[in-house]
Image (tube, helix red, strand yellow):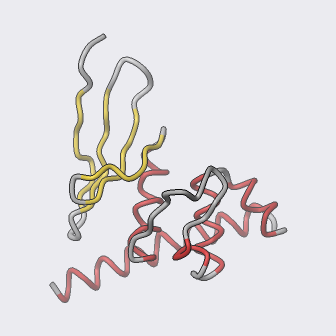
Amino acid sequence: MTDSQETVIEAYDDGSRIVHEERNRPDVYHFEDRNRRIASFDLPQAARLYADLYAIAGGFDEKQTGRRGVPPSIVSADEEVRMTYLAVQLSVTYAARAFDVDESVVRDAVDSVHARAAELRSGADENG
């Protein structure tokens, strides 16, 4: 087994980043906050979406939430954020069923979360 190789593919002003880990098994994408690995995903899009949720929620802790549990800061957030959290952690289909909506509604929520995070980050760039 060879050592894996990691490359930062996206870095944010708050110190968080997305890291691509190339390895013998399928590659993986990690979301890290100040050099602490928070979550790992098979797809870079999922890691970016998670980073957007993390930014909008002001961070959150998933310890002791279990596979289907939701952190308190996500539970108290608006419906788009809650839908998107379920979509990134489980699937768009799961989120749609949980909220009793069409999958297109969940995809719209995901798009909105991406846009809100981009706006949040651009505002931080202007102020920082």
User: In the image, is residue 1 above or below residue 20?
Assistant: above
Residue 113 lies, with reference to residue 86, above or below; the image says below
Q: Residue furthest right?
A: 100
Of the 4 image quadrants, the one containing the C terminus is bottom left
Front-lying residue, 108 or 69:
69
**In front of the other: 33 or 111:** 33
Residue 33, quarter of the rendered image: bottom left
Q: Residue at position x 35%, y 81% from top?
A: 120
Report whether 47 appears left or right of 97.
Answer: left
- Residue 45 in picture, x, y percent from top left: 46, 50
Q: Quadrant of residue 59?
A: bottom left
Q: Nearer the viewer, residue 106 or 28?
A: 28
Residue at x 65% of width, y 50% of height: 90
Position in image of residue 102 (x %, y %): 81, 65
Taking the spot 36% from the left edge, 45% from the top edge, the residue there is: 30
Q: How many marks?
A: 0
- Residue closest to the eye, 13 or 73: 73
Q: Quadrant of residue 126?
A: bottom left
- Is residue 121 shown above or below 71? below
Left or right placement of residue 97 versus residue 57 in this view: right
Q: Residue at x 78, y 69 (%)?
A: 99
Q: Position of residue 14 (x, y in %)?
A: 23, 70
Q: Where's the N terminus, which quadrant?
A: top left
Q: Position of residue 28 (x, y in %)?
A: 40, 35
